[in-house]
Image: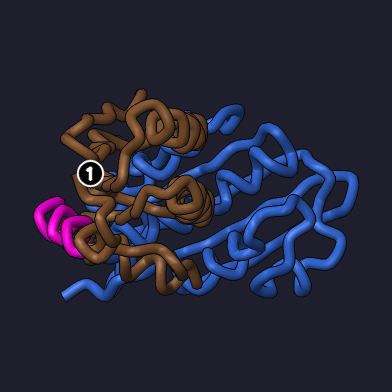
Amino acid sequence: MADATAVTITSDLDVVSARQAGRELAVLAGFSQGDQTVIAAAISEIARNILIYARRGEVHLRLAVEADRSGVIVVATDQGPGIADVERSMQDGVSTSGGLGLGLGGAKRLMDEFHVDSVPGTGTTITMKKWRRRV
Amino acid sequence: MEVPILKQGDYLIASIQSALTDADLTQLRVSLGERVGRFRSKGVIVDVTALDVMDSFAVRTLRDLAHRTCLRGAETVIVGIQPDVAFAMVQLGLTLKGVATALDLEEGLEFLDRQLKGRSGRRG
C-alpha cells in the first residue's frame, strides 16, 4: 500500500473502506494494534459525519515519517453546510442530526492533534493526526 | 454482507463474520426482531468478535437492537468485544449501558441459561 491514499465518501460502504485504509496506514507507521483501532474508530466517526451532513466528501490519509516520530495524518473535506459553532459541535451530546453527538469530540479524544476548519455554506475540513515515537 | 443468524433451541445466535456497513447493522436489527417473534426465542446472542471497530453508530444500533429484543421477551447478550475495541469505545465515550455483555460465545450461552433458569416455569 502507498503511503498516501484518498477515499471518496458517498455511501456507508466508503466509511468502512476509509477506516480500513486508515488501519493499513497505521500498520505501516508501526502503531500498536490498540492504536490502529483507535485511528480506525476516529476515521469512522468523521467519515460518517461527512455522509450525514454533507452527503459526499473525501478522506485523505497520509503516512508521516519524521526523524523521531511517525504518524498518520487524516484530512477529511466536504463541501457541505459547514459547522456554525465548531466549539459547541465538539461537546459530547451535541448533535444536529439526532445522533449520539459523540462523533467530533470523540474523534478528538482519540487523536493527538485535531483541527476543524469550517465555513458555513462552504464546507468543512477536519485535520487530525496521531503520532508514535520512533525508537 | 448479511449476518447469519443461527437458531439453537430457544436461542438465536447472530454471528458477525466481517466488517459491517451501517446498512448491514440496521438490517441485523430488523432480522433479529422478526426472528424472535417467528421462533418464539427466549434468548439472543450477538457475537461481535469479528468487528475490529465499533464506532458511535455501531454501538447505538447494537444497544437499540438489544433493548428491542429484550422488550420482545428475549434476553439478549453481546459477546466478543475485543480489548482494543473496548478501549476505543471508552475513549469515544460510548457505552452499552443496560445491555448484557459477556466475554465470548461460551460465556454468553451460560449467561442466558442462568437468566432463563430464573424465569419461573418458562424454561422448555
Q: Residue at x 29, y 58 (%)?
A: A36
Q: Amino acid at mark 1?
A: Ala
Q: Position of residue B3 (x, y in %)?
A: 32, 29
The residue pinned by badge 1 equals B50
Instruction: Judge left or right: residue B58 versus residue B107.
Output: right
**As displayed, is residue A17 above or below residue A98?**
above
The magenta stretch spans which residues? B105-114
Chain colored blue: A
Judging depth in this view, the residue of B6 and B36 nearest the camera is: B36
Q: Secondary structure at mark 1?
A: loop
**As displayed, is residue B53 above or below residue B6?**
below
Chain colored brown: B
Judging depth in this view, the residue of B75 and A118 nearest the camera is: B75
Q: Residues within 10 Å of mark 1 (few under 14, many from 20)?
A: some
Q: Looking at the image, can residue A74 be seen?
A: no
Q: Residue at x 22, y 31 (%)?
A: B7
Instruction: Judge left or right: residue B40 versus residue A111.
Output: left
Q: Residue at x 46, y 70 (%)?
A: B97
Q: Position of residue A22 (x, y in %)?
A: 38, 47
Instruction: Output the chain of dot 1.
Output: B
Query: In the image, is residue B63 part of the stretch drawn in magenta?
Result: no
Judging depth in this view, the residue of A93 and A51 nearest the camera is: A93
